[in-house]
Image (tube, rainbow, N blue to C red):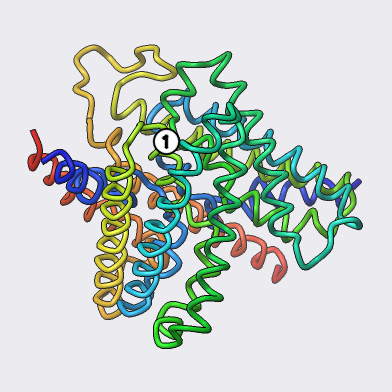
Amino acid sequence: MDLMKIFIISMLINNIILMRFIALCSYIGMTNDVGQSFGMGMAVTFVTVLATAATWPLYHYVLAPLHIQFLEIIIFILVVASLVQLVEFYLKKNVPGLYAAMGIYLPLITTNCAISAVVFENISLNYTFIQSIVYAVGVSLGYLLAMILLAGVRQRMRTSPVPKFLQGTPILFISSSLIGMAFMGFAGLIK
Amino acid sequence: MKNLWKVFKAGLVFENPLLILMIGLCSSMAVTSSVANGIGMGLAMTFVLLFSEIIISACRNVIPNSIRMPIFLIIIGAFTTIVDLTMKAYLPELSKSMGVFIPLIVVNCIIMGRVEAFSYHQKVLPAIFDSFGMGLGYTWVLVGMSAFREVLGNGTFLGAQVMPASYQPILFFILPPGGFLIFGLFMAFNLWLKTRMSRKADAKENA
């Protein structure tokens, strides 16, 4: 029950993009079509879960016993960056199909804020390992959902008359505001 | 000197990181629900940007091109840690209300982008001007947005009541969707200003 709650809160109620404004750069930059945003979302999901699985034990079994928690930021960033690189090598060699589908997105997510936010929060929220993994999955699926939603809206927008002063990026933020208002309705799911 | 001024002004207006380059958006909307947060975030960001640009531009001949990214990250990470720990020690309230966004300065696109595009190829002095321009360009947009959001959504400015007591605060502006809306309108305003300015310049040329 507790895990379910974490999942729903992280995916819908506290949606990482629409409610917490993390990872906006890719949200605006990578949603030109639905396929692209789906690929990006899947790559982020994959790496976030892997990074959580790597950083949680690292913090609790290496950094905490040695009392060097203050190195958290530097070490986690390095872990995420090298993990992305390793995943890229591995996929290229062993799973070329998957690499072709999301390979080009992998270098882009080295500094994706969604991943870094999740690995830092797993520590600051004091989650257990299982809770951290569930949290990572929830957050990144929320990311995927928001990406696909905006990509869909953008596709429709191409054929609709947008007021001149809002053309280009401003209208994207206005529509995100409206999507965000709809997401506020999810707050009722959990008491 | 004139060139330095130009670099400074580019960050402030013509290449404003938030409104024109559109980088570093994540933190800008999350922290602007109150003016104090906006100022704090802007200054923290300017500090990290300033020192990272100085160090990287001073070491630009020593850093090998092929592994520059991890080195940049370590330098930026070190200054972010300094800001994070300092704020936790001396401004615990502010640090708490900004939460994860202080550690996230590390991956803020503004810093990475400026370091990669500017200070890695420039001398120290232009890098200092660039970091001030970009940092203050970021700060003024944050303060502007948070002023709108706090006054409309809470009726206060920096915590002091400014709206008449009968004013019913529009909670929407404090909530996340309000941030998107205000940012979209800021951007539209900036575009309008830019086209107006360039049209005026054109008219001057023709006359």
| Residue B197 lies in quadrant | bottom right
Pick whichever, A103 or A14, lies toward us: A103
Q: Which residue is mark 1?
A: A123
Specify whether A53 is left or right of A137.
right
| Residue B167 lies in quadrant | top left
Pick whichever, B88 or B168, lies toward us: B88
Pick whichever, A14 or B4, lies toward us: A14
Q: Quadrant of the C terminus of chain B?
A: bottom right
Specify whether A103 is left or right of A133.
right
Coordinates of residue A78 in the picture (x, y in percent):
61, 52
Residue at mark 1: chain: A
- Amino acid identity at mark 1: Ile
Q: Note whether B156 is above or below A81 in the view shown.
A: above
Q: Residue visible at 48% across and 35% down?
A: B144
Mark 1 crowdedness (10 Å alpha carbons): few <14, some 14-19, many ≥20: some
Pick whichever, B67 or A189, lies toward us: B67
Specify whether A6 is left or right of B81.
left
Coordinates of residue B57 in the picture (x, y in percent):
84, 50
